[in-house]
Amino acid sequence: MIEVRGLTKRFGPRRAVDDLSFDLEAGRVTGFVGPNGAGKSTTMRMMVDLARPDRGEVRYDGRRYAELAQPARTVGAVLDARCMHPGRTARNHLRAIAALSAIPGSRVDEVLADVGLESVADERAGRFSLGMRQRLALATALLGDPRVLLLDEPSNGLDPDGIRWLRNRLRRFADNGGTVLVSSHLIAELARFADDLVVVGAGRLIAAATVESITSRTGMSLEDSLLEMTATSAEFASA
Ligand SMILES: Nc1ncnc2c1ncn2[C@@H]1O[C@H](COP(=O)(O)OP(=O)(O)OP(=O)(O)O)[C@@H](O)[C@H]1O
Ligand SMILES: [Mg+2]
């Protein structure tokens, strides 16, 4: 169980994240949605100590990220698909990360196979298409065989086949007991495989509920439901 409690982050006068609380449960895929600038990436960065909250905290089964004995084996995060050195091959990138995180080198070939990059493992990441970089970023997150995946717009740049592959991969990760938080603007796609949603607008929580409860309450498609919910939040924000 992951508990996000009262996260708050300002950039100058603007509250990027404003007293945000939600839970993430093991065995479930949670979609993290909201308009551009709603605070999703900032929240995910705070969840892995890449940004410092002004207030609030995140606990992984009761522990803060900094207290985890082996963070890479607990939380795999892809917050930026350009996170690899362009001059390194995919295999060398993964080897370097494995060495840094005390992960056995044997995992490198396993994750390359997992994400379908074996045939280009010795090519430089700088020559990869965006979709291939997304696969390599996911391989990086999977390297420590973590229990939690935090993915910021991982389907960005993937072709339809890649999107289907990602959906199935994340579903399988959750079905094996993992916890997945995935931000996305592809709502129709999320509706197909997310169990729960955390909806934010202007840094605040708008809803944390199952996909099913949101669509059954409004009687609309998930896309239309979210448009309506976040439109109200924008009115609040500007009021
Ligand atoms: N390093 C930063 N310095 C100043 N402002 C920032 C910084 N990072 C984010 N912000 C601001 O914080 C707010 C939230 O941004 P964030 O990137 O978290 O939103 P988001 O929900 O991920 O949006 P998107 O859907 O476009 O990715 C925005 O107003 C953004 O301009
Ligand atoms: Mg973002």
Image (cartoon, grey):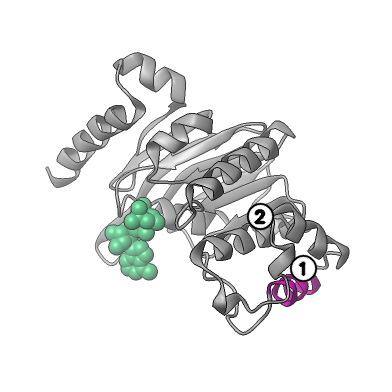
- Residue 162 included in the magenta stretch of the image: no
Q: In which quarter of the view is residue 83 placed?
A: bottom right
Q: Nearer the viewer, residue 57 or 184?
A: 184
Looking at the rendered structure, the kind of residue marked 2 is: Gly
The residue range painted magenta reads: 90-101
Tag 2's secondary structure? strand
Q: In which quarter of the view is residue 95 placed?
A: bottom right
Tell which circle, 1 or 2, labels the residue nearer the N-terminal end. 2
Q: In the displayed structure, does residue 111 sit left or right of residue 156? A: right
According to the picture, the residue beneath numbered tag 2 turns out to be: 76
Q: Does residue 98 lie above or below 114 as drawn? A: below
Rendered location of residue 157, percent (x, y): 45, 58
Is the CB–ligand 2 distance for label 2 below 8 Å? Answer: no
According to the picture, the residue beneath numbered tag 1 turns out to be: 101
- Residue 94 included in the magenta stretch of the image: yes
Q: Does residue 213 lie above or below 180 as drawn? A: above
Please give the name of the residue rendered at 19% of the width and 42% of the height, measured from the top-left corner.
Answer: 234
Q: Are marks 1 and 2 in contact (CB under 8 Å)?
A: no
Q: In which quarter of the view is residue 100 placed?
A: bottom right
Tag 1's secondary structure? loop
Q: In the displayed structure, does residue 231 sit left or right of residue 168? A: left
Q: Dividing the image into 4 quarters, which one contains the C terminus?
A: top left
Instruction: Return the residue found at the far left.
Output: 239
Q: Nearer the viewer, residue 219 or 11?
A: 219
